[in-house]
Image: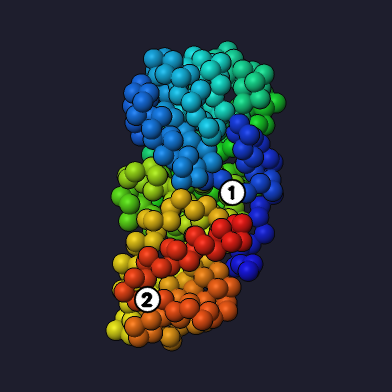
């Protein structure tokens, strides 16, 4: 079912981060960033593999020192998804990680020193066909821009972004993507809107420093969702003060909600009321944990009564409509003879879902 609420996607150049396409007609990618000490190779790899397992398309790794750059070399060799090396100020680190196979350099060209240093990084990226990601943040605008605008505004973020963009374009380098992040949702959204009119490179969406899991997920869903619904955005990161694995899950949930991309099960569940015939909340929570390994897009509706249950089940791959003792089971909108035990709902639904996937080769 097509979601007509989402506008036509903004046209952008397609670039490649490793073998993952970003921009153009490529699927909107979901990424996260490790929060381990990069020099703790084992811990960083463990987190990368956990992110890979939940579907991360791209992973960013901070490389603040030359020691971290040497560790990045080992980490890169054991990773299965493209890695972005996050570097600030020191152009020598950028050159080193490029030698070690970084799939993208997150570095602002205006912050790495004189013309010679800037040119060396750009030439290195060009020679190795490595894209650059420019990252503008409302909390770290250049001093002269802060003085000019007085406070972070959409126009201030745009000015900072275009300063870095023009450095790359002046060196005939257009293999880049860019973000203009802020912790304030409206500031971030309006900054992206301005930037989207100025360039054709891919845009990396995010609400930076969004907060803890609940508040951060809400702010990110609102901000990123607003932009995506307007057709703006090619890749995204949900920034949470939480396990990075949750960033990937929330990112895919945002895309699933807008029907822009599906991965895994989309649970449709009622908020519950006194009409419910089984414990909907515990069943949904249990199944979300048990079925995290499933990557096939699947709509599963779990409704506790017969008021809305049959209607939701008709448009779901698998649906349950609650009734006394045993509840109605639907497959592809067709009510089945078999009924589900309310007492063992989670167990029986898991069996039915996995059996359906196996039976239909999904």
The alpha-carbon separation of the residues under discs 1 and 2 comes to 39 Å
- Placement of 264 over or under 152, stated as above or below: below
Which numbered disc flags the more N-terminal residue, 1 or 2? 1
Disc assigned to residue 192: none
Q: Counting other residues with Cα less than 10 Å from the Cα at mark 2, is it few (<14), some (14-19), or many (20 or more)? A: some
For label 1, the residue is 28
Circles 1 and 2: CB distance less than 8 Å? Answer: no
Q: Quadrant of residue 165?
A: top right
Comparing 111 with 35, the one in front is 35
For label 2, the residue is 341
* Foreground label between 1 and 2: 2
Q: Counting other residues with Cα less than 10 Å from the Cα at mark 1, is it few (<14), some (14-19), or many (20 or more)? A: many
- Placement of 13 over or under 214, stated as above or below: above
- Under circle 2, the secondary element is strand
Residue 174 percent location from the top left of the image: 67, 31
Any part of residue 111 in sight: no
- Under circle 1, the secondary element is loop
**Residue located at (39% from left, 51% from top):** 184
């Amino acid at each position: 079912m097509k979601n007509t609420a989402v506008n036509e996607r903004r046209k952008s150049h397609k670039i490649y981060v490793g073998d993952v396409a970003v921009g153009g007609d490529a699927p909107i990618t979901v990424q996260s960033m490790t929060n381990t000490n990069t020099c703790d190779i084992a811990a960083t790899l463990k987190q990368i593999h956990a992110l890979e397992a939940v579907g991360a398309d791209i992973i960013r790794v901070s490389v603040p020192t030359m020691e971290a750059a040497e560790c990045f070399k080992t980490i890169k060799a054991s990773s299965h998804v493209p890695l972005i090396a996050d570097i600030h100020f020191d152009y020598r680190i950028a050159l080193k990680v490029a030698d070690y196979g970084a799939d993208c350099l997150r570095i602002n060209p205006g912050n790495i020193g004189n013309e010679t240093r800037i040119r060396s990084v750009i030439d290195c990226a060009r020679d190795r066909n490595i894209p650059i990601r420019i990252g503008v943040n409302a909390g770290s605008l250049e001093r002269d821009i802060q003085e000019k605008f007085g406070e972070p505004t959409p126009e201030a973020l745009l000015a900072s972004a275009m300063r870095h963009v023009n450095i790359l374009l002046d060196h005939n380098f257009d293999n880049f993507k860019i973000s203009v992040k802020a912790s304030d949702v409206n500031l971030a959204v309006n900054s992206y809107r301005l930037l989207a009119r100025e360039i054709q490179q891919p845009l990396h969406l995010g609400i930076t420093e969004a907060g803890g899991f609940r508040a951060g997920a809400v702010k990110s869903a609102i901000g990123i969702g607003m932009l995506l619904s307007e057709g703006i955005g090619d890749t995204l990161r949900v920034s949470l003060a939480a396990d990075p694995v949750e960033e990937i899950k929330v990112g895919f949930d945002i895309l699933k909600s807008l029907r822009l991309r599906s991965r895994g099960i989309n649970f449709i569940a009622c908020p519950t009321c006194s009409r419910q015939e089984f414990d909907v909340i515990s069943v949904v929570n249990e199944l979300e944990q048990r079925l995290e390994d499933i990557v096939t897009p699947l709509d599963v509706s779990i409704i506790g009564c017969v008021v809305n249950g049959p209607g939701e089940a008709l448009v779901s791959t698998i649906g349950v409509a609650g009734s006394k003792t045993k509840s109605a089971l639907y497959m592809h909108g067709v009510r089945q003879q078999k009924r589900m035990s309310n007492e063992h709902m989670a167990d029986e639904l898991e069996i039915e879902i996995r059996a359906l996937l196996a039976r239909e080769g999904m």
